[in-house]
Image (cartoon, rainbow, N blue to C red):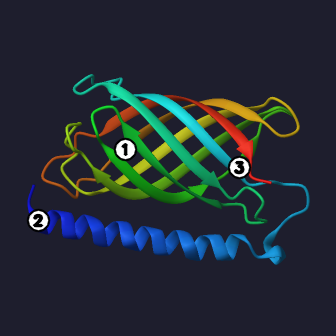
Amino acid sequence: MDPSYNLIRRKYIEKIIFLWIIISVVAGSPKLYAGGSRDYISFSTALFDFLQNDVTSLEARIEYRANSLKWPLKPFGGLMANTDGAEYIYSGVFYEIPITGFLNLVPSFAPGFYIKNNSKDLHFVLEFRSQLEAIFKLSSSFKAGVSFNHISNASLGEANPGVESIAITFQVPVF
């Protein structure tokens, strides 16, 4: 692998870590909390590239969702990795739409950095993820759901093949 690529990758990762520190400090401010809501850690397992089937693999994701903030659009960030070595580090916003007392629809959008390794070539390091999730409240604390997402480079790269994933998600409260 080209040494300059590793240097660029390291600088992007350092910027993401710095951004996470800033988000953590802001999210930790007690003035931003609306009583009763909790932040969640979300764990997902998915089928990567399940529609086009070019490079289908298993995918795992972990996300931090700042659900306790009063804002309508709430921040989240996460890391995705698949069995072919792809990594996607992202941060974006989500919006919870209550449907019933136990069901919410959650659209989200997150730009991030994609490293393909032996996985599907998305032709650009900057990628954008759009997702729609149906999340069910299992108890007063735990949630589970299913989601569909699409990741693409918005035609910034030499090609824009995109990739879709379908996932099962479990969410546990942070505190």
Q: Quadrant of residue 7?
A: bottom left
Q: Amino acid at mark 3?
A: Tyr
| Foreground of the two, 28 or 51 | 28
Relative horizontal placement of residue 129, taking residue 175 as reference (left or right): left
Q: Residue at x 83, y 77 (%)?
A: 31
Furthest-right residue in this view: 35
Label 1 element class: strand
Which disc number belongs to residue 40?
3
Query: Percent position (x, y) of residue 143?
Result: 74, 35
Query: Closer to us: mark 3 or mark 2?
Result: 2
Percent position of residue 38, x then y: 80, 54
| Residue bearing the label numbered 1 | 151
Find the distance from the CA under tag 1 to the CA under tag 3.
23 Å
Q: Earlier in the sequence, mark 2 or mark 1?
A: 2
174 left or right of 110?
A: right
Q: Tell me, for residue 3, which label it has, or none.
A: 2
Q: Name the mark nearer the viewer: 1 or 3.
A: 3
Residues at marks 1 and 3 touching, judged by CB atoms closer than 8 Å: no
Residue 1 position (above or below residue 151): below
